[in-house]
Image (spheres, helix red, strand yellow):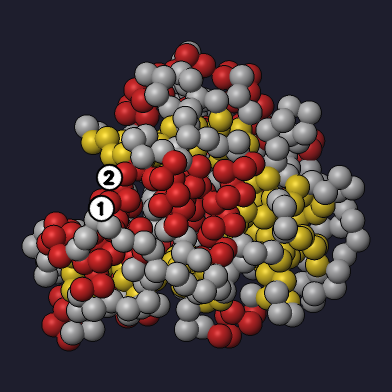
Amino acid sequence: MNLAQNLETSASFFPDRSAIRENNLNMTYTQLNYQANRIATGLIKMGIKPGEHVGLCAPNSAEWIVFYFGVLKAGAVAVTLSSLLSKEELVLLIDHAKPRFLYTTEARLNDLKPFRDSGLLEKTICPGGDLDMSQIAGMGSGTFKAINRDRKSTAAILYTGGTTGTPKGVMLTHEGINFSSIMIAHLERSCETDVALCFMPFNHVFGQIHIMNSTIFSGGCLELLPSFDLERILKLTESGRITKFYSVPTVYIRLLTIGDLKKKMGKVRYCFSAGASMAMEIVKQWKEKTGITIIESFGQTEGMPITFNHYYPEKHVVGSVGQDVYCVETQIRSTSGKLLKQGQEGEICVRGPMVMKGYLNNPKATKDAFWGRNWLRTGDIGRQDANGYVYIVDRLKELIITGGENVYPREVEEILYTIPEVGECAVVGLPDKEWGEKVAAFIVPKEGKIIIPDQVKALLKTRLAPFKVPKEYVIVDILPKSTAGKILKRELKRTYVEGTTLTA
């Protein structure tokens, strides 16, 4: 088995169909497969062997996809790193993953100099580096079949933990990513005529697996943008060339401020949100304005997808992340590992073919991530109803304990989003001498609107138990976010403690 065989299959069925569109580039499946073959055979001539690590640290592009599948075809492991890493973060992850070669950008060469000088990083692949893509391709052949690997072999390593602490290298297998790609394509009824807009970073599980790999599997086309660009996104959707739209809650919130949104969505038939839980109020507003339901699923880098909220009108449940996908099992357990009854809130634990192999060079973290041998602890608090629908309550690590009482931030945030003046919000626990932690709400007002904290507090008092009502209200211009669009609550706490102002 080799994940790259999905590309080979799509190239055989749809040789002349567009695989990638990027600016003026239109790359067919034949061309993508041919170029990936040249990279694979070029890497092999350079000495890469199956199982060895090859890094990618660059923005989204057609070239990134070519190199990724070239690495996989050669039997190597693709270590995918964010192009936005600081020098310190990049050095940390390169030292941890130890890739032999790194596909990157010229702007990164100074950051990588210590590794190049020491020989730890053998080759940098970029303009101005040791060699560029064209030189590798020039060594290779366009005719090649992906090297067979054991289905449990590592295909890719994605780093996670940016919102909760030190990043960990998640080892995902050929079988696991293949299962994820097939399952997503099936649940979304993807086909070769679909065009998926992708501006989510490929180093992240959402961009790399949910969008890129599932689209390649189904023979569809990837319309690439290097990052979020509202003007270009709306131009593409309104032109009618996009059928599938993928984003994060913060982008949907921003798009809801756009006039004549239904027209601007053009021929988009499918909308999906990931990266963070979507407030029910946003789902309702989007449906009212566009006629399209925002679909959610539940998953994480360590295993995805876990659940899927069906977009059959009679099956979609607003507020839920859906039911278990095929071949995946879910349990709700206490923090001590005890299996809880239906409807009780606890940590969501899962098992199935999509679950990670483990964390790279971190056996303790791997052991701590599981109950027994194969039940992955997701770190998310939730419950499951009689029909199997899962409801996310909050992140286990974001639980606020104030005066001995438990407060789940999402419960408070859901109510805040019903206030017309609220654009975005985040609820966190701040240190407090009397209560241990106090509940605090950080709020970004909608453009032209004013938030009056006393009025917000008065409303919350009618909807929540007294201990859940925030004691602190901080009005800010922006909320800090990760590259995947997830609100960085640790950063919010830090800026508050340091007295830093959050401005656009």
Q: Residue at x 44, y 41 (%)?
A: 13
Residue 151 picture quarter: bottom right
Under mark 2, the amino acid is: Gln
Q: Residue 203 or 404: which is nearer the viewer? A: 203
Question: Residue at horizontal 41%, vertical 51%?
Answer: 7
Can you see residue 269?
yes
| Residue at the limit of the structure toward the left, as seen here | 128
Q: Residue 216 location, x and y as percent? A: 44, 46
Q: Is residue 15 left or right of residue 6?
A: left
Q: Is residue 496 visible?
A: no
The residue at which mark 1 appears reads as 35
The spot of residue 335 in percent (x, y) is 77, 72
Q: Which residue is mark 2?
A: 31
Residue for point 63% across, 28% down:
293
Near-viewer residue (452 or 399): 399
Question: Which quadrant would residue 291 be assigned to in this image?
Answer: top right
SS for dot 1: helix
The numbered dot on residue 319 is none
